[in-house]
Amino acid sequence: MHSYTTIKICGITNADDAEFTAASGADFIGVVMHPGSVRCCPVENIETIQNVINKTPSVLVFGDDPPEYALGLFNRFDNGSTYIQYPVRSTNFAQIAESVNSEKLIPSIAIDESISEKKIDEYKSYAWVVFDTGGKKDSQGRVLDGGTGVAFDWNAIKEVRRPYLLAGGIKKENIKEAIEQINPPGFDISGGVEKSPGIKDHELIKNIIDIIR
């Protein structure tokens, strides 16, 4: 077991859930800003969320969104402990990477089958990366960058030794299995701690953090 396992709770849309999650010991509060997501947070809620989580870092999470939209929101709400998460498969990733300090950018890497050491090495300048399930499509046929609620084959990243957050279908029922199988340095959990998309279940949040810690 890692001496400390980092926890990001994602898909937060309101101050009540944000405050509870931060107080329960989460290390990152993820706020989805991709307009196509069922967990997209209203822009007017972001400042309130940041105020109630105090010094807990917030992560503004984007899909393949226009750089001016993503960077505009990031620059507007960057309070010194704000991060931006953006998919590496996007043709806009390079532009985002040029504009944001590497310590504040969390690349999201979609795992379809396996991932090479060379591919992971491309992102060694970033403090964290997110590994999420790739290859799934939404109802319009667009490839999703995360939020699928489906786990990928964890063996694909078994040998990875850099800091990362494991995402994709993580919930109370499989978290112990993930710890036993690959013992990830961090978890990124969204749908697994919800009552409905964007509305968190406080008991599930507390339970899953207790299990991890």
Image (cartoon, rainbow, N blue to C red):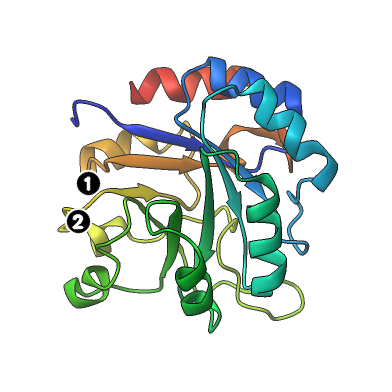
Q: Is residue 39 above or below residue 136?
A: above
Q: Is residue 139 above or below residue 159?
A: below
The residue located at (56%, 79%) in the rendering is: 92
The residue located at (70%, 81%) in the rendering is: 141
**Residue 212 image point, x, y percent:** 35, 26
Name the disc covering residue 158, or none. 2
Q: Nearer the viewer, residue 176 or 83?
A: 83
Name the disc covering residue 182, or none. 1
Q: Marks 1 and 2, how far apart in space?
A: 6 Å
| SS at mark 1 in the image | loop
CB of mark 1 within 8 Å of CB of mark 2? yes
| SS at mark 2 in the image | loop
**Residue 98 image point, x, y percent:** 46, 72
Instruction: Look at the image and tell me in which quarter the C terminus lies.
Output: top left
**Identity, as a three-letter code, of the amino acid under mark 2:** Lys
Q: Nearer the viewer, residue 39 or 128?
A: 128
Image-quadrant location for residue 204: top right
The answer to whether 211 appears left or right of 150 in the picture is left
**Residue 209 image point, x, y percent:** 44, 23
Label 2 environment density (alpha carbons within 10 Å; few <14, some 14–19, many ≥20): few
Label 1 environment density (alpha carbons within 10 Å; few <14, some 14–19, many ≥20): some
Image-quadrant location for residue 192: top right
Image-quadrant location for residue 199: top right
Q: Is residue 74 above or below residue 28?
A: below
**Identity, as a three-letter code, of the amino acid under mark 1:** Ile
Point out the tag, 1 or 2, that comes first from the N-terminus: 2
**Residue 3 image point, x, y percent:** 19, 26
Instruction: Look at the image and tell me in which quarter the N terminus lies.
Output: top left
The residue located at (53%, 79%) in the rendering is: 90
Q: Nearer the viewer, residue 211 or 5?
A: 5
The residue located at (75%, 73%) in the rendering is: 139
Q: Is residue 65 visible?
A: no
